[in-house]
Image (tube, helix red, strand yellow):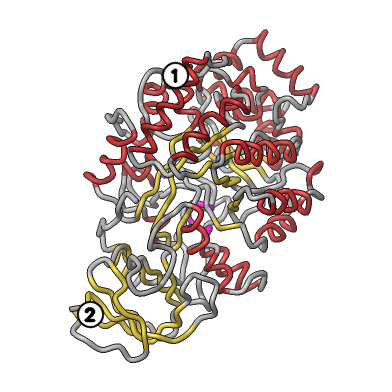
Amino acid sequence: MYNVIIKNAKVFDGTGKAGFYADVAVKDCRIAAIGKDLEGETTQILDAAGLVLSPGFIDPHTHSDLPLMVDGLAQSKIRQGVTTEVVGNCGSSPAPLMGAVVKEIQAEAEPYGYKVDWTNFGSFLDKYRSQGVAQNVAALAGHNTIRACVLGYDDVQPTPGQQKAMEQLVADAMQQGAHGLSTGLYYPPGFYAKTEEVIGLARVVAQHGGIYASHIRSESDTLMESIREAIEIGRRSGAQVQISHLKLEGSHNFDGADRVLEMIEQANRDGIAVGTDQYPYDASSTWLGAILPNWAQAGGNEAVARRVKDPATRKLLVQDWKDHRLDWENRSGITNWDQILVVTAQGRPEVVGRNVQEIADQDGKDPLETLFDLIAISEGSASAVWFDQLEKNVQYLMKYPRLVTGSDGNALSTEGVLGSIICHPRSYGTFPRVLGHYVRELKLLTLEEAIRKMTSLTAAYFKLEGRGVIREGAWADIVLFDAEKVIDKATFTHPQQYPEGIPHVMVNGEWVIQNGEHTHALPGKVV
Ligand SMILES: [Zn+2]
């Protein structure tokens, strides 16, 4: 007895093969049959004429770790057709949870009113299992988290014993279900780490067959050196490399796309497996404190806010910012003030949705001082969207065959506690934006190639067995969408809008979205 026979859809199997008309039958959690005019006993027949049937999309780069704990329905992702998310990116994972990390992660969970209570990686993943999630979750262990467990958040180097302790935590996480290690070498305390430290940890990952995913040290002034470092880590550790959210930030780099892709190609020719992912927007998003020199980002949000509040330290910060040295990524040096859109500002909610120049004009202050004030009043938590890239480069990179689509966003919701989280539109729009805007409207990619970059290629990178493909025996992660209508609705000023044109989404054989409505089913697995 089948759960469902999906009839008359145009099937794209995820491998890059052109679409073909076939029926697809699902039994329990798996795809049981694919063929013309399938018959057999079935609970449901769905006539999907006019729709595309594709493997559920796999989002390789998300920060949904805590949002999925708070609300497992994963509304903003499942409605995009995402059936598996990779969490724990950019060096940040909520586990292992010990030492200085406990306070930091609890602070991150605070806005959601959530209490974190796991200890190691295994008990963290068990929490998803016991609470239930709508989509599958694959998790990476974060280097910043692991480093902070052993060394705290300060600018220090590990002793051999501490290096060993970090390597042991990576080994434990891998044994308890992590798919690999992520770094955020752009963020504290990751940026204190020397390359050797990361190589040591990535070696452990390689021994377990995992992936090394990196938010590299710089995506602007020292982009090329940073990509070289990621490749070097892959070469010396033996780990497969994923360069996260590939982009060229800042006008100094706008002509570098060819060079970047050539470096990745050369690495692959040399036998180092290097892949990459991208979100389809020309603006990035991060906390405002990221504009500070590395030394001023030490010690967590509170410490950062304290420095900005102290008049003497603030003077030093202004000087460092003006010097525009290359040993830290001076984000506001690569954008204009009106290109920095404030999206969260605890303590000054009225400035959300406005750019730093506008806020400064209204305050009658210098924009840099205004930005420091926002960091201070929000106790370091304020964040922004930075319009720091060229659309031309976004499109150029998108066509690169080794690049997959990834949101760098969260599984959010327009309702409940997650509804108050203002965000970059990528959390709501990434996948339908590629399918509607870049494939249908701009014809930048064929539909089968775009789907391959959302499914089978991503599954191969993260070793997700039996996912990302429509074939008999594969997991029944399926999305049905209207290729003529699918489109993102989320914008930078109104991000909390679900996409259109994706009526049905199935995870492990169960409908999570049916006729555009969430069924409240939680069939996701920790994979
Ligand atoms: Zn990142």
What's the distance in space between the residues labelled 2 and 1, CA to CA?
53 Å
Residue 103 quadrant = top left
**Rendered location of residue 199, percent (x, y):** 57, 31
Categorize mark 1 by other alpha carbons within 10 Å: few (<14), some (14-19), many (20+): some
Spot the residue most to the top: 312
Q: Which of the marked residues, 2 or 1, is nearer the chain's N terminus?
A: 2
Q: Nearer the viewer, residue 231 or 105?
A: 231
**Rendered location of residue 17, percent (x, y):** 54, 77
- Compared to residue 40, the image places residue 456 above or below, namely above
**Rendered location of residue 517, percent (x, y):** 32, 66
> Mark 2 is on which residue type?
Gln
Residue 136 quadrant = bottom left
Considering the numbered disc 2 on the image, is that residue within a helix, a strand or a loop? strand
Q: If the picture is divided into quarters, which one holds ligand 1?
A: top right
Rendered residue at 47%/15% (across/down): 161
Of labels 2 and 1, the one closer to you: 1
Q: Is residue 354 something one can see in this rendering?
A: no
88 left or right of 175? Answer: right
Considering the numbered disc 1 on the image, is that residue within a helix, a strand or a loop? helix
Q: Which residue is mark 1?
A: 150
Q: Nearer the viewer, residue 309 or 506?
A: 506
Q: Which region shows up in magenta?
A: 426-430
Judge whether residue 298 is colored magenta.
no
Rendered residue at 75%/58% (across/down): 392
125 left or right of 284? Answer: left
**Rendered location of residue 378, percent (x, y):** 51, 26
Rendered residue at 20%/81% (across/down): 42
- Compared to residue 286, the image places residue 323 above or below, namely above
- Compared to residue 38, the image places residue 523 above or below, namely above
The label on residue 44 is: 2
Residue 310 quadrant = top right
> Mark 1 is on which residue type?
Val
